[in-house]
Amino acid sequence: MSPDIRRVAAPIGDDGSGDLGILSSLHAACFAQAWSPEAFRVLLAMPGSLGLLGFVGDTPQGLLIARRVAEEAEILSLCVVPPMRRHGLASALLAVGIECLERAGAAKVFLEVAETNMAAQEVYRVSGFSLVGRRPDYYLLPGGCGVAALVLVRSLAGVVAARSDT
Ligand SMILES: CC(C)(COP(=O)(O)OP(=O)(O)OC[C@H]1O[C@@H](n2cnc3c(N)ncnc32)[C@H](O)[C@@H]1OP(=O)(O)O)[C@@H](O)C(=O)NCCC(=O)NCCS
């Protein structure tokens, strides 16, 4: 499989049946609390935002949403639909997303991941992220139980420096 990663342009005039609807459907297939097309519209309209869709063939199968403010960026969402997992799509989305953020001026990329989400933690670990913090009870489960968020970071300046050494 060779994924095709495409940037989602600022969706002016999208009534929810275009990319906004695709993003929302993908998100709903991956998370219990899905983000609406309108929520994606608001996110993508923010300055410094980045939206990517990951295609396999002609079908969108995953997404990445990020935002950069000055030299710091944050991955706000990353997901791949269940049937397409373990084929490298999340890694491809992360690689393209990080490159876009770095080119736009980001020196560090942060994200939060549930302490119980071992699959995502592994994806981020192999993509070069490391642990810098822990927020207790950050996520609330339906039963009222709290789950901690791990804060991960990847330093992009370090990556550029390492590349230029070789
Ligand atoms: C986490 C998620 C995005 C991973 O997507 P993916 O496309 O399957 O990830 P990749 O195929 O790029 O995986 C890259 C590497 O991460 C690790 N990895 C991925 N899923 C894993 C799992 N379930 N268990 C253990 N390691 C895993 C592996 O090392 C994998 O490489 P390999 O398949 O060659 O062994 C996907 O499982 C998902 O959408 N989960 C639900 C939403 C979510 O939790 N998003 C993250 C929120 S912070």
Image: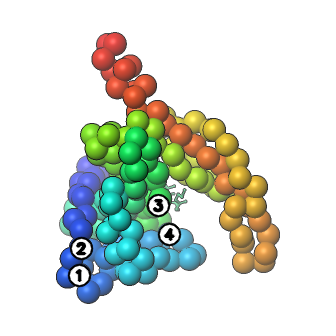
User: Is the residue marked 3 within 8 Å of ligand 1, measured from its CB?
Assistant: yes
Q: Determine the secondary structure under disc 1.
A: loop
Camera-near label (4 vs 3) is: 3
Q: Earlier in the sequence, mark 3 or mark 2?
A: 2
Kindly report the distance in space between the C-alpha atoms of the residues bearing marks 1 and 3. Answer: 21 Å
Image vertical order of residue 67 relative to residue 109, above or below: below
Residue 7 locus on image (x, y percent):
24, 58
Amino acid of disc 4: Cys
| Residue 88 seen anywhere in this rendered image of the structure | no
> Quick one: 18 or 62, which is closer to the camera?
18
Residue linked to disc 4: 30
Which residue sits furthest front? 70
Pointer 4 and pointer 2: residues touching (CB < 8 Å)? no
Camera-near label (4 vs 1) is: 1
Q: Which mark is residue 77?
A: 3
Q: Residue at x 26, y 86 (%)?
A: 15
Kindly report the distance in space between the C-alpha atoms of the residues bearing marks 4 and 1. Answer: 23 Å
Pointer 3 and pointer 2: residues touching (CB < 8 Å)? no
Q: Please state if 157 lies on the left or on the right of 132 as rendered.
A: left
Amino acid of disc 3: Ser
Residue linked to disc 1: 14
Few, some or many residues within 10 Å of mark 4 (<14, 14–19, 20+) = some
Q: Earlier in the sequence, mark 1 or mark 3?
A: 1
Pointer 2 and pointer 1: residues touching (CB < 8 Å)? yes
Q: Quadrant of the C terminus?
A: top left
Residue 84 locus on image (x, y percent):
40, 61
Q: Determine the secondary structure under disc 4.
A: helix
Kindly report the distance in space between the C-alpha atoms of the residues bearing marks 3 and 2. Answer: 18 Å
